[in-house]
Amino acid sequence: MAITRPSVRRRPRPEIVARRVSDPPPGWLGWITTTDHKRIGILYLVATFGFFLLGGTEALLLRLQLGAPNNNLLSPEKYNALMTMHGTTMVFLFVVPVWAGFANYMVPLMIGARDMAFPRLNALSFWLLLAGGIVFYASLFFSPPEAGWTSYSPLSTGDYIPGNGQDAWIYLVHLTGLSSALGALNLIVTIKNMRAPGMGWGRLPLFVWAVLTQSVMLVVVLPAVAMAATLMLTDRHFGTCFFSSACGGSPLLYQHLFWFFGHPEVYIMILPGFGVISEVLPVFARKPIFGYKAIAASTVGIALISMLVWAHHMFTVPVAPVVLAFFMIASMLVAVPTGVKVLNWVATLWRGTIEFTTPLYFAAGFLAMFTLGGITGVMLAVYPIDWQVHDTYFVVAHFHYVLVAGSVNAILAALYYWYPKMTGRAMSERLGKLSFWLTFAGFNATFLVQHSLGLSGMPRRIYRYEDLGNWAILNQISTAGSFILALGVLVTVYNAVRSLKRGRRVGPDPWRANTLEWFVPSPPPPHNFDAIPRVRSLEPMRDIRRTIEQATGESQTRCASEPVGPKAGHAG
Amino acid sequence: MRAGAATAVVLMSGPASAWGDALTPESGGSPNADQIDSLYKIVLYVAIAVFVGVEGTLVYFLVRFRARRGRVAAQIHGNTRLEIGWTVAAALIVVGLTIVTFAKLGAITNPASGPVAVAAPIAPGGVTAAVAQPPAGQAALRIRVMGLQYIWRFEYPNGVLAYEEMVVPTNTTVLLDIVSEDVAHSWWIPKLGGKADALPGYTNHTWFRVARPAVFRGQCAELCGRNHADMIAHVRAVPPDRYQAWLAGQQREIAQARRLARQARPDQTSTPSRP
């Protein structure tokens, strides 16, 4: 029997096909019934920035309490509750879902799709997130959780904290986890199947690479924390004994399960930020990204290695020496692809013509400060050093350099960069730069001194401290800095709200950027693209501008003498 | 090596003020803390070099290549040789730090040898990462450290108990077996070395050795509940003869307290309702 070769057949590109188009209901009903990825993206962004302000307020209260030695502003139970709410909010309700918001809005536009692959699932993801946030914050009216965002057992499982706040935390982990997992699956399927014709893996924008990698990580590691939270729930209420050594369980099991999720979670929070930096730098240096393949490959490399480093959070528990050695080397190895990225970004600026717009300010601030967070990360990986600085303010400083100077700077860069696309109006550059300098100064004042606090023996998570050595003055500097940082964030919030009505109108491509989202009007119509352009390179908009130039003879490249920023945008 | 470390200490401590030690971990109490401090300094110097290199280049590029009239951006897509170069350089730094760490590790985890003032044979115990077994034939003092919400309890070999303040003899290797009865705590006296978590169901280990009489302060480093901040511990190192006197005094006091308790409640031993 002759074997016929399967014929090489072009698979049709999946698309969202509308059989019937009806106008969305007007007003708030339109928002709560929407399945449009752009509206869902806005919902995500508004909700997560709301949680960001809540988490920030909690942080300011903590800093007020720590502003003076032996302070009595907050009772220990209030301090522990606020500390738990702050950490949990920032991780589960701000940084992870804010990226879901940007990804929701931008990924379909950047890959030339008309919506996400599963629009209704997309809406479900958002509402699950909001439900998680509401359930968690409802505990404020009863008894909020007090065991920290890490919620170590036995403190979280035994009868050590009155009230049932811990159950609100478990509920939040499940709801936001389900939200993230569904959202991640949606993004994976969308990116895999719905790219514009010609957009091979080598032409995928680096933000989309980062989101894809992050989504795969979420799908892999979320089950671990779901497991940890479920076992915690049954330990608390059904007499199981998974985490208690008194009856055959192990508190170390909880720590392993939690950090198997918890460490990759750090990269889940930073990878899309890396993606934003990789988009913003080339646009404003007017130069292609330096080493596209290296950056894409290092994204995947970071994801792989970051799932093998979790026990570096557990260097002080009783473990075998080989565990310490393995996790030290693995943790330091993560620094290699991360370092490669940083050097590639710096090289992207080399011989460019850098335009100092607000997104570039935040991207440069990211580079400057994230580098310090990365370096202290390597120091922490050396486990004898970790024995000294683990669970101190040195660690607090380290992860705020990664999460605030890293992720939050990237989030603000993304906000200033994409705001004109989402609203059709530009945010004020003047306020933007003011916000940058305030957050930059405030952030460093808050967290730089905390390295020294930790090195001089101040543990984290203590609600008060004695007047020892430099503790009082360093804490005062830190508290003062936190209010400057908060002011900087408020300037951006004000800028965003004010620009909705009063921002200058911009065309489709105010920054003269490279990727497909700038091809469509600002804000984009519900169906995104009338016609989806064929992608011929990593920078399709550059190709399109060149084509227009050839056809019309009109220069589409910016002269360096032109004023920078949205003012220079051509009204498309 | 030691001369180098000494120079480093002089360099880092600078003017005699509380700020001299602002960039390094606490040290000066026990050899393991000193060794961690010197390992930290090596890593810190590498870190400073990398930081200054990256930040300097970044700032230089931001200033040098800002948009100006007539300047055109070079359309460079990358440079494979350069990229491989810095990947290898980053990997070499990692390899170097790993080698330095393992070279230093023995001095941090192996209890120091030296004259032994208090001879008490060491019971066989587990070798864990934070403390290797001391060389055979050497004697040391072994204390069981128990974390309780919110106080540290110290159990001495002869049954003597102490709370909050641990009294130890100078020039003696003190081995700690760290346990917990309730939630997770973490034993940490910064000048006497790194942390060791106290977890219910596990025994953790660390050690220290103090040369001169002194008092060291530390506090619980793992969130253990509402009054975690108040779980302070002190280690008071005294000359061996005064340690023996303290031990005898404690023993007497405990015996007297037991006697008094028996007098007050003669049927205590037969009463099952004792909590």
Image: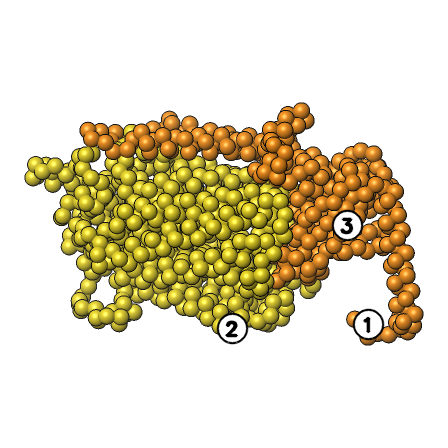
Chain colours: A yellow, B orange
The residue that mark 2 highlights is: A142
The residue that mark 1 highlights is: B274
Looking at the image, which is closer to me, B164 or A424? B164
Q: Earlier in the sequence, mark 1 or mark 3?
A: 3
- Whether residue A216 is visible here, answered yes or no, is no
Compute the Cα span from label 1 to label 3. 28 Å
Looking at the image, which is closer to me, A306 or A388? A388
Q: Mark number for residue A37?
A: none
**A107 horizontally vs B264: left or right:** left
Chain designation of label 1:
B
- The quadrant of the picture occupied by the C terminus of chain B is bottom right
The residue that mark 3 highlights is: B166
How crowded is the residue under tag 2: few (<14 C-alpha within 10 Å), some, or many (20+)? few
**Mark in front: 1 vs 3:** 3
How crowded is the residue under tag 1: few (<14 C-alpha within 10 Å), some, or many (20+)? few
Q: Amino acid at mark 3?
A: Met
Question: Which element is circle 3 on?
Answer: strand
Q: Amino acid at mark 1?
A: Arg
How crowded is the residue under tag 3: few (<14 C-alpha within 10 Å), some, or many (20+)? many
Residue drawn at x 48%, y 48% as measured from the top left: A446
Looking at the image, which is closer to me, A302 or B113? B113
Chain designation of label 2:
A
**Mark in front: 2 vs 1:** 2
